[in-house]
Amino acid sequence: MTVPNGFTREQTMRIAKHRIVAALRERGQQARADWVERELPERVDSDKHVGLLATLRLDPADLVEATSP
């Protein structure tokens, strides 16, 4: 199954930490954004951190950078 960003469900998505931080800051969640900046790696594995992303109410598909054609 392919999702709109071109990844299949079986592929792990890598999300740039700065995109997570930006999404949180846009929602006014400064403390959570600060925590993410300190604790997460530069490239976040969507499978490994699925629970955290759900807790933060972030959809990995919305955060993945578009791939080049």
Image: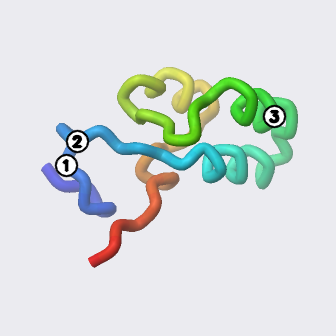
Q: Name the residue beneath numbered marker 1.
A: 8
Q: Residue at x 47, y 25 (%)?
A: 49
Q: Name the residue beneath numbered marker 3.
A: 34
Q: Nearer the viewer, mark 1 or mark 3?
A: 3
Q: Could you say where residue 42 lies in the image, as x and y percent from the top left?
A: 57, 40
Residue 11: which numbered mark, if any? Answer: 2
Which image quadrant for residue 52? Answer: top right
For mark 2, give the secondary structure.
loop
Q: Residue at x 32, y 61 (%)?
A: 5
Q: Residue at x 85, y 46 (%)?
A: 28
Q: Give 16 or 61, whichever is nearer the viewer.
A: 16
Residue occupying the far bottom of the picture: 69
Q: Could you say where residue 2 lies in the image, as x and y percent from the top left?
A: 18, 55
Q: Is residue 4 above or below residue 27?
A: below
Neighbourhood count class around disc 3 (C-alpha, 10 Å): few under 14, some 14–19, many 20 upward: few
Q: How many marks?
A: 3
Query: Do labels 2 and 1 touch, CB within 8 Å?
Result: yes
Screen quadrant of the C terminus: bottom left
Neighbourhood count class around disc 2 (C-alpha, 10 Å): few under 14, some 14–19, many 20 upward: few
Q: Earlier in the sequence, mark 1 or mark 3?
A: 1
Q: Residue 2 vs residue 39: left or right?
A: left
For mark 3, give the secondary structure.
helix
Q: Residue 63 vs residue 29: left or right?
A: left
Spatial CA span between label 2 and label 3: 28 Å
Q: Earlier in the sequence, mark 2 or mark 3?
A: 2
